[in-house]
Image (cartoon, rainbow, N blue to C red):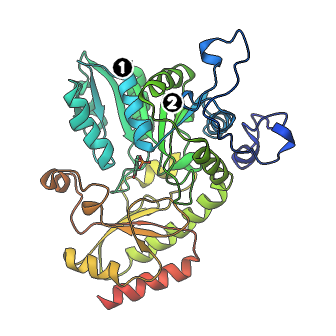
């Protein structure tokens, strides 16, 4: 049994687990059953069905995720985009308006700029300067959306100011906490109403499922759940089981990701072949002061530009032995990618470059291999080009 005052490492193992253990099983078994016996005189909400997100596998995950992010409630979804799209479709309707931080994950950006715009939901990019924010609020503005660490420029904004701004103007604050994870940042502790996650990444950590989560205020999570049941973006119990298993080692993995990424970013920053390195753990980074104040670690994501063009970037990536050239992030293996052709490929190229995402930008998701091996490999690939 866990207590609310337990540390996050203990909560990851014990919070949300069924008590008593089902059938005495130490590890929660997979309830691969779409439907469950009717218990008589049940309300609609008590009926158990996979799409209603209420099998024992869902319930345990919901309780665990809420506990580790110090939040009231949580909900798992079929993907990160399932979490983001369902949350925004729940909280916004035709005629509404939202303010979104610049430089969001490409899928989120496109959902806001194209899909929501198609439903007559307007939006504006939040200015960099917080003193400009109040003037951006319209009578129809309902929501502020940001990322704890942006993808792929790895920026950290004044997140506390953003949550306070939303609260002061009666707006719902939603933050994508995929890159920071609850180990490094717990949005509810800093005034955010909801966090969304791609559970595909660090929460699961093994690059073997696609999943998502919505965590935060109980009333908002219940509303998102209601919409999710109708949209059907439900996580399958087998994927729930894998996410549950992955979560248990999140603290250990994040500690390693934090340490290794910091070491690699420091190494890259001093390398003569590098034009630019983005990592919030570097004092030279514009978001460093916010990250140092709010986060318990700077995360496992680094992005950089090498002197030269796209060809140089491609030759560097091709010369690597350990990092695998593949989209996605947050797994135990180091992955490397060029966002212009992966995570942000769907965007208009001019718009993408305008956001500061150059075609030569490289994004590295630092894994949990021996950091000396990864660094030596990066060094030999840089020397080759
Ligand atoms: C920050 C961020 N949020 C959300 C998503 C979408 O997650 P999923 O692919 O699980 O739908 C991604 C995917 O890369 C991401 O990087």
Residues at marks 1 and 2 touching, judged by CB atoms closer than 8 Å? no
Depicted 104 relative to depicted 40: above or below: below
Q: Which residue is mark 2?
A: 191
The residue located at (35%, 30%) in the rendering is 144
Front-most of 301 and 34? Answer: 34
**Badge 1 or badge 2: first in the primary sequence:** 1
Residue 218, percent from left and from top? 57, 22
Front-most of 16 and 253? Answer: 16
Residue 148, percent from left and from top? 44, 45
In this orientation, does residue 332 appear?
yes
Query: Which type of secondary structure does the marked residue at label 2 adopt?
Result: loop
Q: How many marks?
A: 2
Split into 4 quadrants, where in the image is the N terminus?
top right
Q: Where on the picture, by quarter, is residue 133?
A: top left
Q: Which residue is mark 1?
A: 169
With 118 as the anchor, is 59 left or right in this view? right
Mark 2 surroundings within 10 Å by alpha-carbon count, few (fewer than 14), some (14 through 19), many (20 or more): some
The residue located at (49%, 61%) in the rendering is 300
Q: Where on the picture, by quarter, is residue 126?
A: top left
The residue located at (71%, 50%) in the rendering is 9
Residue 160, percent from left and from top? 45, 36
The residue located at (40%, 41%) in the rendering is 81
Depicted 29 relative to depicted 74: above or below: below
């Amino acid at each position: 049994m866990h207590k609310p005052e337990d540390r996050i490492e203990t909560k990851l193992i014990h919070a949300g687990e069924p008590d008593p253990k089902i059938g005495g099983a130490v590890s929660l078994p997979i309830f691969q059953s779409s439907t469950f016996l009717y218990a008589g005189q049940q309300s609609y909400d008590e009926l158990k069905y996979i799409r209603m997100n209420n099998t024992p596998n869902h319930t345990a995950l919901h309780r665990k995720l809420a506990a580790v992010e110090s939040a009231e409630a949580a909900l798992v979804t079929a993907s990160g985009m399932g979490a983001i799209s369902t949350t925004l479709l729940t909280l916004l309707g035709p005629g509404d308006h939202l303010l979104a931080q610049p430089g969001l994950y490409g899928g989120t950006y496109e959902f806001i700029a194209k899909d929501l715009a198609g439903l007559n939901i307007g939006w504006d990019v939040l200015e960099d300067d917080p003193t400009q924010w109040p003037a951006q609020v319209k009578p129809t503005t309902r929501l502020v959306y940001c990322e704890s660490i942006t993808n792929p420029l790895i920026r950290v904004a004044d997140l506390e100011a953003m949550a306070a701004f939303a609260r002061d103007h009666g707006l719902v604050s939603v933050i994508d906490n995929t890159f920071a994870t609850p180990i490094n940042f717990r949005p509810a502790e800093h005034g955010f109403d909801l966090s969304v996650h791609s559970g595909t990444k660090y929460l699961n950590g093994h690059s073997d499922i696609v999943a998502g989560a919505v965590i935060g205020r109980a009333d908002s999570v219940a509303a998102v759940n209601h919409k999710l049941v109708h949209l059907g973006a439900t996580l399958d119990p087998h994927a729930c089981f894998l996410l549950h298993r992955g979560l248990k080692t999140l603290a250990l993995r994040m500690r390693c990701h934090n340490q290794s990424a910091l070491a690699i970013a420091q190494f890259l920053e001093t390398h003569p072949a590098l034009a630019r390195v983005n990592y919030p753990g570097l004092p030279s980074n514009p978001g460093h002061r916010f990250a140092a104040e709010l986060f318990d670690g700077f995360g496992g994501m680094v992005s950089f530009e090498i002197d030269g063009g796209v060809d140089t970037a491609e030759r560097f990536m091709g010369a690597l032995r350990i990092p695998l050239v593949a989209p996605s992030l947050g797994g135990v293996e180091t992955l490397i990618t060029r966002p212009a052709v992966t995570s942000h490929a769907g965007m208009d190229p001019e718009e993408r470059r305008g956001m500061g995402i150059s075609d030569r930008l490289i994004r590295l998701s630092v894994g949990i291999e021996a950091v000396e091996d990864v660094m030596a490999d990066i060094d030999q690939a840089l020397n080759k080009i």
